[in-house]
Image (spheres, rainbow, N blue to C red):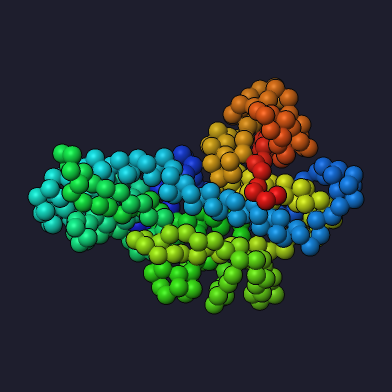
Amino acid sequence: MFGERHRRGYRGLASGLLSVGVIGAILAITLDVDLPSTGHAAASGTRCGPASTATIASVDDFVARRIYAAELSGKEAGADTAHITGSAELLAALERADQPAVYAAVHTIVYTPRWHIVRLRVLQHGRVLADVGGPDIIAPISGTLRFKGRTVGRFVMSVQDDLGYVKLVSRFIGVPIDLYGTPRPPGTFVMGTLKPPPTSVSNGETVTVGRSEYQAVVFDTAAFPAGTLKVALFVPAPASTLAPRSCASVRLAAWGNVAHHIAARFKPLSAHYNDLRIVLQGASGGMVFVRSGSVRLAGAGPARVPHQGTLKYRGRTWAVYSWEAIPPARIYFLTPTVPGS
């Protein structure tokens, strides 16, 4: 079990990024999903083959970056920033340069129920007056505190901790993830799910742990209150049934993997179709809707949509992934374009 700070951080990202509290256990689903062939590989004679792992990694990287970006600019981050900059108690305490009152106001903000600030630091003239919250925090947001038209201080806050981010990425994507760096020396392992963790890792590197081989996807994020935290995703080689397919088909299977992982978090799924739509759209940037025949159960979409293949809608072409989670209801996922694909 993890502590209250971590639980609040996890809920903070779930509500801030995805606008809904997500509960339930994740099911282990492999990339060998039940995906009908689009016919693309057969028609063109091309196989993704050795590029399959990199193709899957591009989807996983895209989703992990979206989750991180939402920590910085999602609705929850905006709402909590407003709570801080609008706190009369905090602003008045700063105007008086009353450090005990500043600390009390910061403590109240961080521990207010249903707000999701996991750490808040307040400074005045470069001096830290209060710093409340847990360790190992990701995605800091900085801002200015003003009282009666003049600047009285600055703040650094976050709506997510490292553990919450690790849990979201691993449960929404289903691949191991490790964090390296701040507050430890650069390159030092902080926490994660691949055991034992590599001592160092670079983007695109092949990593072998035990008998398993992974392709590493590494990108930089910001640590609290400053510094770089490296995120490393470890994408396993796909099931052998994917290699003969085209890269477009492999990419669609990767999106299906994300969709199934997120859908598995809702119990019962039939009562949470709209929640699934919000979560999957937030994590992917695609479009999701659920229908039972001609009856709309969640979301809006084109009047007619194929169960597989491509669809032109709203001025662009989408690759369609769909499945009957609970027949006869079918979930349609119009998958987004991954940069560089």
In the shown orientation, is residue 103 left or right of residue 37?
A: left
Percent of width and height locating residue 198 = 57, 75
Is residue 37 in sight in this rendering?
A: yes
Report whether 40 appears left or right of 95. Answer: right
146 or 56, which lies in front?
146
Measuring from the top left, give residue 230's x and y in whole percent: 50, 65
- In this image, 53 relative to 115: left or right? right
The residue at the point 53 percent across, 37 percent down is 278
Q: Residue at x 61, y 62 (%)?
A: 217
Image position of 7 with respect to 336: above or below: below
Residue 79 locus on image (x, y percent): 35, 40
Q: Residue at x 41, y 73 (%)?
A: 184
- Of the 4 image quadrants, the one containing the N terminus is bottom left
Residue nearest the viewer, comparing 109 with 337? 337
* Residue beneath the point at 51% across and 50% down: 67
Pick the front one: 334 or 196: 334
Query: Residue 81: x and y, percent?
Result: 32, 44
The answer to whether any part of residue 176 appears in the image is: no
On the rendered structure, is 97 left or right of 301?
Answer: left
Q: How many marks?
A: 0
